[in-house]
Amino acid sequence: MSRNSKVKRDARKKKEPARPIRRLGASLQPHAQLLDENDTAVGGVGWRDGEWLLVLGGQVVARSESAAMALAMLKHVVAVQASADRDLRLEASPPLLTAASREAEGLGHTLEEYLAVLEQERLERALGAPVATTPSASTH
């Protein structure tokens, strides 16, 4: 092998245009958005390769096979931001709401009841101990 072959190869690579990073799998199908007061999307949920992906700030921060869990995560983000005096509006697609409702019905709950159950579980994990269920949380 000649000494010049590496120099030529490096020069050729420098001239080639950069190739974009190609992600494996299907494209992300958006199903819910978190919108600020200016109707700017700050996050949301999308469906890709059999999973619901929670996206915040342009990055996937959580994933779940459960549509109801995806909605619960979005509602939690809205609540956290509301406590910091930042109002967000949640808009969800009919397919996401239908999938979440079917999950809830399969467990004997309405969607709102099941979202309250998921929030209760989140609180228990955060505190490390069971939290007493309030009557208002169990009646929704």
Image (cartoon, grey):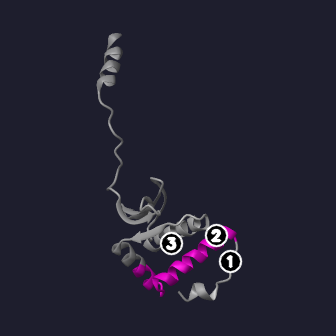
Q: In this view, does 107 lie to the left or right of 11?
A: right
Number of numbered discs visible in the structure rendering? 3
Residue that extends furthest to the front in the rendered view of this protein:
38
Measured as percent of width and height from the top left, residue 57 is found at: 48, 54
Query: Is residue 93 among what the camera can see?
Result: yes
Q: For residue 125, which numbered disc appears in the image?
A: 2
Main secondary structure of the magenta stretch: helix
In the image, what residue occupies the spot 60% across and 75% down? 121
Q: Position of residue 101 (x, y in %)?
A: 41, 80
> Is the residue marked by circle 1 packed among few (<14), some (14-19), or many (20+) residues within 10 Å?
few
119 part of magenta stretch: yes
Q: Mark 1 points at which residue?
A: 130
Q: Residues within 10 Å of mark 2 (few under 14, many from 20)?
A: few
- Which segment did they paint magenta? 101-128
Proximity of marks 1 and 2: CB atoms separated by less than 8 Å: no
Earlier residue among tags 1 and 2: 2
Q: Which amino acid does label 3 sit on?
A: Ala
Secondary structure under tag 1 reads loop
Q: Amino acid under label 1?
A: Pro
Dot 2 amino acid type? Arg
Question: Which residue is more in the foreground, 2 or 93?
Answer: 93
Q: Is residue 134 above or below residue 86?
A: below
Question: Taking 120 as reference, is 105 left or right?
Answer: left
Please report whichever mark, 1 or 3, sits nearer to the chain's N-terminal start. 3
Vertically, is 67 above or below 20? below
Residue 85, position as x, y percentages in the image: 59, 65
